[in-house]
Image (spheres, helix red, strand yellow):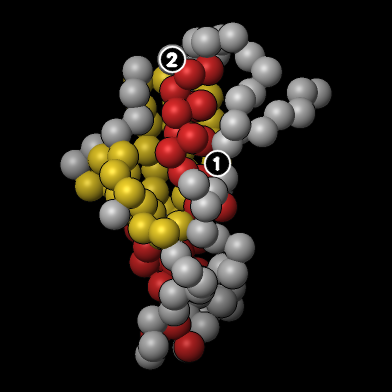
Amino acid sequence: VVFGDASRRLPFKDKAFDFVIASHILEHMAEPAPFLQELQRVGKAGYIETPNALFERLHPYHIHCLEVIEKDGVLHLHKKKGPVEDAFLGTKALLADEAPWGRFMFESPELFHVRYFWKDRIRYEVD
């Protein structure tokens, strides 16, 4: 087991890994650039998965610092000041496990999550 802080410097050499996976981590980063730079430093390629902005608006988490979408191979990151809930839909618990939309989310996770594969560099913009 290796403990490290991916938002600073991980205890690995440059390009130590052929492939790195960051699943449900990016959305927790108040400052995403150092984290993404560190992934690129230690990895040659990788995969990033986060809830997307639609998921965040329907079911916001207080501990998420970012809303994320991917468009044309670029991650777009929007810093949140707090949970951003759609004023109408976000209050209806549409993604509850037993609700039809909740079942739909589990059957079609690609509609509610960003699944971003990268090689050599991560293309991103902080909007």
Q: Is residue 43 left or right of residue 69?
A: right
Residue 41 numbered tag? none
Kind of residue at badge 1: Ser
The Cα atoms of the two marked residues, 1 and 2, are separated by: 17 Å
Residue 7 percent coordinates (x, y): 58, 36
Q: Is residue 12 above or below residue 20?
A: above
Residue 20 percent coordinates (x, y): 53, 24
Residue 8 percent coordinates (x, y): 60, 31
**How many numbered marks, from 0 up?**
2
Quadrant assignment for the C terminus? bottom left
Q: Residue at x 36, y 52 (%)?
A: 77
Within-10-Å neighbours for mark 1: few <14, some 14–19, many 20+: few
Residue 102 in view in this figure: no
Residue furthest left as drawn: 72
Q: Residue at x 37, y 62 (%)?
A: 53
The reply to whether the C-beta atoms of the residues labelled 1 and 2 are less than 8 Å apart is no
Residue 96 percent coordinates (x, y): 56, 77
**Nearer the observer, 20 or 97:** 20
Within-10-Å neighbours for mark 2: few <14, some 14–19, many 20+: some
- The residue that disc 1 covers is 23
Q: Residue at x 44, y 75 (%)?
A: 84
Quadrant assignment for the N terminus? top right
Q: Secondary structure at mark 1?
A: strand
Residue 53 in view in this figure: yes
Q: Earlier in the sequence, mark 1 or mark 2?
A: 1
Q: Secondary structure at mark 2?
A: loop
